[in-house]
Image (cartoon, rainbow, N blue to C red):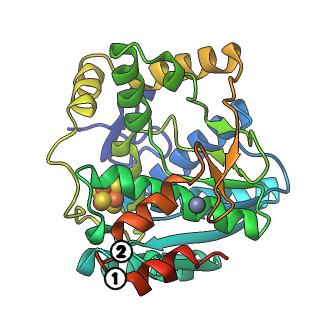
Amino acid sequence: MKNAKCKKCGKPAVVKFRTYRISLCEACLPAFYESLVERSVKRHRILRENERVLVAVSGGKDSVALASTLKNLASKLNLSLEIIHINLGIGEYSEKSEEVVRELAEMLEIPLQVEHLSDFGFTIPAVRMRKVCSACGTAKRYLMNRYARLHRFDVVATGHTCDDFAAFALKNIAGGNLEWLLKFQPRAESFAEGVVTKVRPLFERTEEENLLYVKAKKLPFLADKCPFSPPKDEWKEIVREIERKKAGFMRNFVRGIAKIAAESGESVASVKYCKICGEIASSDVCAFCKLRLRSVVAGSENEMRRCTGYFM
Ligand code: SF4
Ligand code: ZN
């Protein structure tokens, strides 16, 4: 960044957004970043005027950037916002995450709902599965959708990034898994009763951009890694390596895939509802209830009864 000047104000620049070939100072960076998100939201019709948006915030940089940019968009699109944070019961990590989200919600003046997984009979460390992250994803999706449905939100917004989507897309192309690839939408409309529409306003923003934004805006965020997070994500490393050689690759790639997915139309599998909790399921019992039943203390019949009876 030697001698580079901010394109907006002429002061010394501190960062360069390579995809956009623009150098910026710290003071001009947030408005530029927010204008990019606004452009994505309008171009892809990710959010519509007057919608009630439930914003999922874990406390990491991406979801913190999401909440802050949606706050900026709320007055322009007349959105009403509420943050949901899910405490996964992962010891100190979950305690710190909740603290950060409470601080953020207060700073942005957005109402906050904290759901504790332990209130549903288990925590993530109690999950007896090899793929803990996949169980965690099931729990988060379930609790977000459930809360949004019960409180009549129009959409649930998540902080999925360009890196997430590019890695996901490449992995599925490599595996010939086109069915999954075609689920890729910045706005995934509800496909059945009880399923709330999901939106991903940051799908064109890289994790690097999100980090620059939250730091420039001095927003609270948790940099600690979850103790269960895998040591490395090789698919993300691959797409970032291509990005280093070809600036803008990730954004163009995810845009292209989203276009193909939108043009291919949706194929909706038959819908079932869980016999235990009534939420959407792919078999008689939903993935969340299966998880709950497997995770309760072995041999504890009372606990098992409490869990199966939770939603009755
Ligand atoms: Fe959940 Fe895995 Fe993320 Fe930890 S790393 S919060 S277990 S998805
Ligand atoms: Zn269920």
Return the mark for residue 300.
1
Return the mark for residue 296.
2
Q: Which residue is at a point 61% across and 53% down the rendered structure image?
A: 157
How crowded is the residue under tag 2: few (<14 C-alpha within 10 Å), some, or many (20+)? many
Asked whether the viewer can see residue 212, the reply is no
Q: Which SS class for mark 2?
A: loop
> Identity of the amino acid at label 2?
Val
Q: Which residue is at a point 58% across and 23% down the rendered structure image?
A: 258
The answer for how far apart the CA atoms under marks 1 and 2 are is: 7 Å
Can you give x and y, in whole percent of width and height, for residue 144 in the image?
A: 59, 62
Do tag 1 and tag 2 residues touch (Cβ < 8 Å)? yes
> Between 68 and 176, which is closer to the camera in this rendering?
176
Asked whether the viewer can see residue 236, the reply is yes
Q: Which SS class for mark 1?
A: loop
Q: Quadrant of residue 214?
A: bottom left
> Identity of the amino acid at label 1?
Ser
> Between 252 and 225, which is closer to the camera in this rendering?
225
Q: Which residue is at a point 36% across and 74% down the rendered structure image?
A: 296
Is 58 located above or below residue 238 in the figure?
below
Can you give x and y, in whole percent of width and height, for residue 1 in the image?
A: 23, 38
Quadrant in the picture for the C terminus:
bottom right
Is 23 located above or below residue 249 in the figure?
below
